[in-house]
Amino acid sequence: MSPIDRRLITHMNWGLVGFTGLLFLFGVANLYSASGVRMEDGIVVSTFYQKQLLWGLMGLGGMVFFMLFDYRHMKSLALPLFIITMILLAAIPVFGKVVYGARRWLPLGFMNLQPSEVAKIAILIMGARFLSRSREPLGWKGLFEVLALGGLPAGFIVMQPDLGTTLLLLMLLGGITLFHGVQPGVLKTCLVVVPSMLPLAWFRLHDYQKQRIMTFLDPGNDPLGAGYHIIQSQIAIGSGQLWGKGFLGGTQSQLRFLPEKHTDFALAVLGEEWGFIGCVLLVVLFCLFLLSIFNTARDAKDRFGSYLTVGVFFYFFWQILINMGMVMGLMPVVGVPLPFISYGGSATLVNFCLIGLVLNVSMRRFMFKTS
């Protein structure tokens, strides 16, 4: 191994590798339990956890791939990737597969591809490239250019409909933008105008999205319908108390009272079986995970690498915050999974690829001077 290769390995963020591995294994174990159904002759476990392991192996391959090349070369790939993503999103209304009333997936025979997951990487790289061009805080012109950059894919995704991913994309881009800096006058105006326009967004929501907000305000208004998810989730988490009911010991999940227990509400399964202590340990693990990403952003030696890493930080931060909030009834249900804990092939693959990007930046932070 050459000296430069040894330095790449030495400078890798090994803490992030460890925290990512622990989160994924924690998620697979929780998914094993979430896949179980208690029958008269014992517990029958479905294959969700096996599929998640397979996606995890594919994700490791994607992570290694994103580590191999110098991330600075991605500047030249940002626009082609963005164009390909827009083509995939535009193909959804024509060729998309409908699942649970939403048209979000493109059938590829051996798998279903969710272009909105690819859009997260495309927006991240394109936003980092755009914002790294200058050190100056954004004025109105620059801010509108950023909004146009995020608005194009967001417009396609919100029509699928997928409000959760749409908000996540915009908040990811917004996080990078705030990290870059916005002129004080522009920021103050936005802080006044944007909240005042939120009530108008109510009339652009689908009926089921309005119902989710009303259910968030009063889940008991429709306990057997729209409020069922939140109520059962709160029952599951609350019944876990301090130490939980033990692995495979949950009643809400094993007796099928808890819907979507392997995807959006995987945290409720964990809370029921491992209690308050288990949830606290998971939050601590996520905090260490996010801190490792932030440290890489702080140590990056160029703006493009720093913005890439900050984008990954906000990508995971918002998902963790929103999912935990909606599972506990503190936020409306918007269909955002919990990274590495919820089941999802495309999401798992994207998660590992983004971790590969962060590791790429950390490995090469010694190779050139600050710019």
Image (cartoon, rainbow, N blue to C red):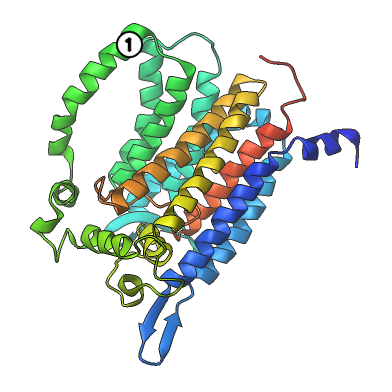
Amino acid residing under circle 1: Val
User: Which residue is at 38% across, 79% downward?
Assistant: 37
Q: How many marks?
A: 1
Where is residue 251 drawn, in percent x and y?
Answer: 32, 74
User: Which residue is at 29% across, 12% downward?
Assistant: 188
Taking the image as shown, residue 145 lies to the left or right of residue 20, namely left
Taking the image as shown, residue 41 lies to the left or right of residue 118, namely left
Where is residue 366 drawn, in percent x and y?
Answer: 76, 25
User: Which residue is at 56% across, 30% downward?
Assistant: 308
Where is residue 148 drawn, in percent x and y?
Answer: 37, 25
**Label 1 sits on residue:** 186
Q: Is residue 109 visible?
A: no
Q: Is residue 55 visible?
A: yes
User: Which residue is at 26% across, 45% downward?
Assistant: 331
Q: Which quadrant would the N terminus be assigned to in this image? A: top right
- Most extreme residue toward the front is 242
Taking the image as shown, residue 27 lies to the left or right of residue 156, namely right
Where is residue 136 drawn, in percent x and y?
Answer: 49, 8
Image height of 82 relative to 245, above or below: above
- Most extreme residue toward the bottom is 41
Q: Which quadrant of the structure image shows residue 238?
A: bottom left
Taking the image as shown, residue 233 lies to the left or right of residue 280, namely left
**Closer to the camera in the image, 365 or 287:** 287
